[in-house]
Image (cartoon, rainbow, N blue to C red):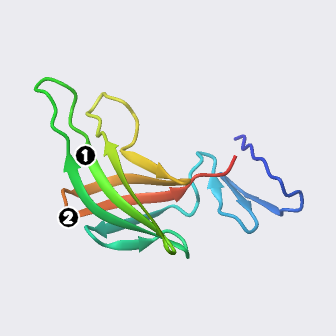
Amino acid sequence: MKIEYRTAVAALILIFFPGILHVAGCSAYSASGRSARTRVVTVKRNSTIKLTDRVSFTFVAHSHKMTMQGGPSSPLIVYVRYDCGSTHEEHQYNIFFHEKGGSSAEPAWEWKGHVFVIIDYRYNDYMKLRIYKKPVP
């Protein structure tokens, strides 16, 4: 297995475990590019979870777009809010769930290096998410 990494700091201590590269003082990343600090959480509508010590994430609501009969499938629209101290950002994401035999893309979105993958959801009730931070190239 080949793991490539770049760093601007030459004095980092590198510890290698099978399949995982640990950089002292940083998150660990697997060979697939997912953080070893991947976590699975269930967030209810209008509930907030902490992403980091300074950043929180709120699941606001779900919605759908109207589509033409016989046209593409309707995406699940996810409304979220990120709170970074006194700064707030509201976003909406169009999430497509691909049917069997379709694209292999995961139903996910990214925000400032954080990846949110929808594992399960109940419309306007909750989302079960796998959250991880992408490695810095």
Looking at numbered disc 1 in the image, what kind of residue is underneath it? Leu
Q: Which mark is residue 76?
A: 1
Measured from the top left, where is residue 127 in percent x and y?
29, 60
Label 2 amino acid? Asp
Task: In the displayed orientation, state which residue is furthest to the right.
Answer: 11
Residue at position x 55%, y 76% in the image: 53
Looking at the picture, how far across and down is residue 1, in whole percent?
Answer: 69, 41
Tell me the SS state at disc 1: strand
- Between 101 and 61, the residue placed more toward the observer is 61
User: Dot 2, crowdedness within 10 Å: few (<14), some or many (≥20)?
Assistant: some
Name the residue beneath numbered marker 2. 125
Vertical order, 82 against 114 (above or below): below
Label 1 environment density (alpha carbons within 10 Å; few <14, some 14–19, many ≥20):
some
**Mark 1 vs mark 2, CA separation in Å:** 13 Å
Q: Quadrant of residue 43?
A: bottom left
Point out the tag, 1 or 2, that comes first from the N-terminus. Answer: 1
Give x and y (percent) for residue 34: 56, 52
Question: Which residue shows up at 40% across the image and 72% down it?
Answer: 49
Please identify the residue farthest to the top as the structure is shown.
70
Up-down relation of residue 101 to residue 131 (above or below): above
Say left or right for 19 vs 107.
right
- In this view, the residue farthest toward the left is 69
Question: Which residue shows up at 75% across the image and 47% down it?
Answer: 5
Q: Nearer the viewer, residue 44 or 5?
A: 44
The secondary structure type at the circle numbered 2 is: loop
Considering only vertical position in the picture, is 1 above or below 127? above
On residue 112, which mark appears? none
Write the residue at 40% across / 52% down.
117
Residue 85 in the image, given as x and y percentages of width and height: 51, 75
Q: Are marks 1 and 2 in contact (CB under 8 Å)?
A: no
